[in-house]
């Protein structure tokens, strides 16, 4: 698998770590596929009772899609791959048979927030920024944010975040 997606087991706990701190744990195509495989592996282990997903380093949980990597794809292929495979990976995590906790250890942006929204619980580090900034580059949240964010925060707050792209800062 992709070494930038780590799966560690500690007794009955599985920990998935997005390990690309030099790019704020931004996801490229191979990493998205590795997240789906990690979810499948966790689901297949009967001994696992809980799973945590987090990002490596202190700056970022996940900055979403790696814009530089994805910009090499045609718009059609990007849309098809990110939406199809991103949805599949995030849904595999959301459907785990055990509770999935997102430990948002830093900035949680775009697809990173969409990933966190698919988790059962989210715990946010103080000062972490949370945003769906896609509108600022002419995109919309394409990996579930438009459906999951309103369910978590309510329609008004979610719509404001989606149309403004402005971050919300953790007060905890």
Image: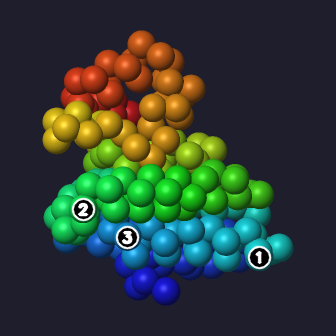
Counting from the top left corner in percent of width and height, residue 163 is at 28, 23
Could you tell me which residue is drawn at 63 percent across and 78 percent down?
Answer: 9
Q: Which quarter shows the C terminus?
A: top left
Hey, which residue is sitting farthest right in the picture?
46
- State the count of labels: 3
97 is higher (above) or lower (below) than 33: above
Asked whether the residues under the numbered discs 3 and 1 touch, taking CB atoms below 8 Å apart as contact, a structural biologist would say: no
Quarter of the image where one finds residue 90? bottom right
Q: Residue at x 40, y 43 (%)?
A: 142
Q: What residue does disc 1 label?
A: 45
- Expressed as whole percent of the image width and height from the top left, the position of residue 36 reads 56, 68
Horizontal side of residue 138 vs 101, given as left or right: left
Q: Which residue is mark 3?
A: 29
Q: Is residue 120 left or right of residue 65?
A: right
The reply, left or right, for residue 90 in relation to residue 51 is left
The residue pinned by badge 2 equals 74
Tell me the CA gap for discs 3 and 2: 14 Å
Q: CA distance from mark 3 to mark 1?
A: 25 Å
In this rendering, which labeled residue sits more in front, label 2 or label 1?
A: 2
Label 2 neighbourhood size at 10 Å, few (<14), some (14-19), many (20+)? few
Picture coordinates of residue 33, whole percent (x, y): 49, 72
Residue at image x 32%, y 25%? 161
Camera-near label (3 vs 1) is: 3
The first of marks 3 and 1 along the sequence is: 3
- When the figure is inspected, residue 65 is found, relative to residue 44, above or below; the finding is above
SS label for mark 1: loop
Mark 2–mark 1 distance (CA, rounded to whole Å): 38 Å
Mark nearer the N terminus (2 vs 1): 1
Q: In the rendered structure, which disc, 3 or 2, sits on the residue that comes first in sequence? A: 3
């Amino acid at each position: 698998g992709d070494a930038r997606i780590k799966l560690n087991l500690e007794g009955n706990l599985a920990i998935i770590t997005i390990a690309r701190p030099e790019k704020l744990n931004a996801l490229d195509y191979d990493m998205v596929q590795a997240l789906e495989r990690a979810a499948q592996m966790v689901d297949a282990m009967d001994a696992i009772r809980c799973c945590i997903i987090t990002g490596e380093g202190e700056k970022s949980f996940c900055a979403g899609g790696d814009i530089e990597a994805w910009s090499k794809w045609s718009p059609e292929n990007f849309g098809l791959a990110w939406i199809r495979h991103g949805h599949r990976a995030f849904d595999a995590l959301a459907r785990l048979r055990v509770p999935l906790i997102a430990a948002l250890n830093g900035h949680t942006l775009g697809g990173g927030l969409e990933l966190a929204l698919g988790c059962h619980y989210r715990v946010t580090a103080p000062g972490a920024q949370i945003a769906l900034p896609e509108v600022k580059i002419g995109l919309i949240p394409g990996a579930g944010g438009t459906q999951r964010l309103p369910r978590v925060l309510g329609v008004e707050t979610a719509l404001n975040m989606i149309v403004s792209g402005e971050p919300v800062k953790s007060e905890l």
